[in-house]
Amino acid sequence: MSDICGKKYEEYIKMVTDFHGTAAPGLLIGGYMVDLAYKQLPKDGFYDVVCESVKCLPDAVQILTPCSIGNGWLKIEKIGRFAMTFFNKYNGDGIRLYLDTDKLKEYPEIHEWFFRTKPKHDQDSDALMRSIREAGSRIVSVQKVKVNIRQEKKKNTTNAICSVCGESYPFKEGSDKCKVCSGEIRYYITEDQKDEHEA
């Protein structure tokens, strides 16, 4: 098995390296999952994708489909399972593809990589990549699913100006501050705040 969504294996590896920075094993498996999805789904469908892992799978979807985090057609549910679901955005009909751990028994290199039974520096990365290429989508299982789609249209959110930082934020009733200034989300500190902490 070498072609992935009409791309030659080497071409896909280059796309992965350019986008992701390295030819990660999970991205190669993710490519075969996307390829299998397209082979299973009706050609005339318009699909959104949900990835159940933040690692590798979202990048495979963004490389091989029009779905991206930016356009909202790709969502990530932080479940931690190596799985993705393609579904019709209008009726919710879809398929869920997942790495089938029972099938990994035939591929010891993939099994030891996935379950981390051997330290990374002791793994044979060339043998692992060969094994993934040989396995292709044979280590993936598919199940039909129905995704819950909200029937009501999303209400347009109005923007307001935060009373603390002065930046625009999505307004919700009862709040005059953005999520950062209200303390709900804090993923950075400014230079001024850094100086205050050090004082």
Image (tube, rainbow, N blue to C red):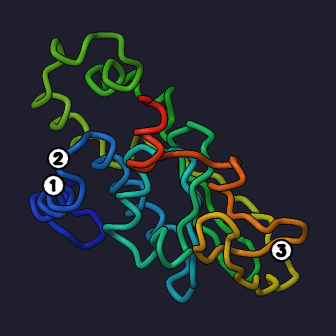
Can you give x and y, in whole percent of width and height, for residue 107 in the image?
31, 26
The amino acid on which the numbered mark 2 sits, given as a three-letter code, is Thr
Can you give x and y, in whole percent of width and height, for residue 134 in the image?
22, 41
The amino acid on which the numbered mark 3 sits, given as a three-letter code, is Arg
Q: CA distance from mark 1 to mark 2?
A: 4 Å
Could you tell me which residue is drawn at 88 percent across and 82 percent down? 152
The residue pinned by badge 1 equals 17
Please tell me whether mark 1 sits on a helix, a strand or a loop.
Answer: helix
Please tell me whether mark 3 sits on a helix, a strand or a loop.
Answer: loop
**Between disc 3 and disc 1, whose residue precedes?**
1
The residue pinned by badge 3 equals 150
The residue pinned by badge 2 equals 22
**Between disc 3 and disc 2, whose residue precedes?**
2
Could you tell me which residue is drawn at 57 percent across and 47 percent down? 52
Q: Residue furthest front?
A: 199
Q: Quadrant of residue 156?
A: bottom right
- Side of 105 relative to 42 (left or right): left
Could you tell me which residue is drawn at 24 percent across and 42 percent down? 24
Please tell me whether mark 2 sits on a helix, a strand or a loop.
Answer: loop
